[in-house]
Image: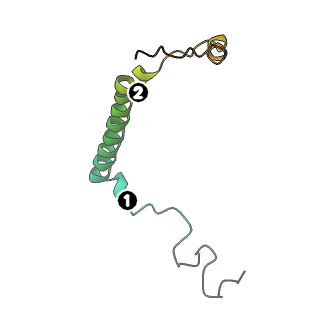
């Protein structure tokens, strides 16, 4: 690490900015426009999540069918294969 030059205060970082919090400069996100932007983005995200949940319950959930009992799955492999009767 390099030591700060003798004329530089120790509280300044390498970019020349003071290390403490900036009390005189207000962030754009804390302004009226920034808060409005945050609310709009939050609303859009909530709306999209709501639509995804709606799509899930309307289209995807009805396709689910109950799983057959394990014995029925095994039994289907042991049923005899009866050839169909040929009608000539």
Of the 4 image quadrants, the one containing the C terminus is top left
Q: Residue at x 64, y 76 (%)?
A: 10
**Of marks 2 and 1, which one's residue comes earlier in the chain?**
1
Left or right position of 33 against 16: left
Between 55 and 87, the one nearer to me in the picture: 87
Which residue in the structure is indicated by mark 2?
60
Separation (CA) of disc 2 from disc 1: 47 Å
- Mark number displayed over residue 17: none
Quarter of image, res 59: top left
- Marks 1 and 2: in contact by CB < 8 Å? no
Q: Residue at x 36, y 52 (%)?
A: 30
- Mark number displayed over residue 26: 1
Between 32 and 76, the one nearer to me in the picture: 76
- Looking at the image, residue 1 lies above or below residue 53: below
Quarter of image, res 26: bottom left
- Looking at the image, residue 53 lies above or below residue 8: above
Left or right position of 74 against 88: right
Residue 66 point in image, percent of width and height:
52, 15
Secondary structure type for disc 2: helix
Crowd class of label 1 (few under 14; some 14 to 19; many from 20; radius 10 Å): few
- Looking at the image, residue 19 lies above or below residue 77: below
């Amino acid at each position: 690490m390099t030591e700060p030059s003798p004329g530089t205060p120790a509280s300044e970082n390498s970019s020349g900015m003071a290390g403490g919090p900036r009390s005189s400069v207000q962030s754009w996100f804390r302004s009226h426009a920034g808060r409005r932007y945050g609310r709009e983005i939050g609303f859009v995200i909530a709306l999209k999540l709501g639509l995804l949940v709606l799509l899930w319950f309307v289209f995807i959930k009805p396709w689910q069918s109950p799983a057959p009992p394990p014995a029925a799955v095994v039994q289907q492999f042991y049923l005899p294969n009866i050839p169909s009767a040929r009608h000539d």
